[in-house]
Amino acid sequence: MPQFAAGVVKFQTDVYPNKKDLFEELSKGQSPEALFITCSDSRIETAMITQTEPGELFICRNAGNIVPPHTNFTGGMTASIEFATAVLRVPHIVVCGHTECGAMKGAMNPDSVESLPHVKEWLGYSKAAVDIVKEIAGDASPEEQMRLLLERNVVLQLQHLKTHPTVAARLAKGDLQLHGWLYDIKSGGVTAYDESKDAFLNVTERYASEMAALATADKNCAA
């Protein structure tokens, strides 16, 4: 804990003064670019991965980057999704999985979480992804099966997102986009889901046209 306290002091003395204008603007409200749903794993640093500033991401984290399908039960994820899409009107939602995910290891081997009843029930929201892996990759190596599970779990949670009324309404209107990402902790690489190909592509390939347009806009602004 002392190192955390020292970190706060460093933020107050070194970081905050250099970004004082930003924080003063943020004190008036928020207008994030995306709802970013990822795992609670301590190795996932969203701002570092995306190189974003405070105020740009509305973040929800839980074990396994899971989105429960919409029901009449009110939970934290459901409420946060509703707020982000209906009030903040975020134009993008990202579901970001990652390698070496303990939650997905538990989903693949449910006996390993038998003594954790709440964890076991929560991971039930990934069961369809597990079943897909067993159906189409049952003869693959454990490493290949886990990689496929990480990908199919992200795709499954994107499907769950579409059951939420505010998400469905925004998608129908055409002013909301869903994105599925997979972050590789060891390499720092990020792959992104391409629905038209039902495959995860390198992020530079997946967003080539969008990044080119952004570069052109930045160039025009500089001119």
Image: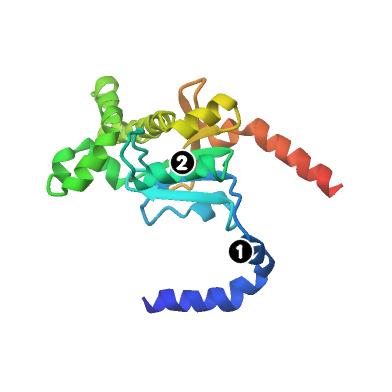
Disc 2 to disc 1, C-alpha distance: 22 Å
In this view, 191 is above or below 12? above
User: Which image quarter is the N terminus in?
Assistant: bottom left
Q: Is residue 83 left or right of residue 31?
A: left
Q: Is residue 137 left or right of residue 34?
A: left
State the count of labels.
Answer: 2
Where is residue 140 shown, x and y percent of the image?
27, 26
Residue type highlighted by circle 1:
Ser
Instruction: Give the labeled residue for mark 2.
Output: 82
Callout 2: SS: helix
| Of callouts 2 and 1, the N-terminal one | 1
Nearer to us in this view, 98 or 169 = 169
Where is residue 77 shown, x and y percent of the image?
38, 44
Where is residue 87 shown, x and y percent of the image?
54, 44
What's the residue at 82%, 46% (across, down)? Answer: 221
What's the residue at 36%, 53% (across, down)? Answer: 41
In this view, 44 is above or below 69? below
Residue type highlighted by circle 2:
Glu
Report the residue that reaches farthest toward the right. Answer: 223
- Residue 64 at least partly seen: yes
Q: Is residue 6 left or right of residue 101?
A: right
- Residue 98 at least partly seen: no
What's the residue at 71%, 35% (across, down)? Answer: 212
Instruction: Give the labeled residue for mark 1.
Output: 27
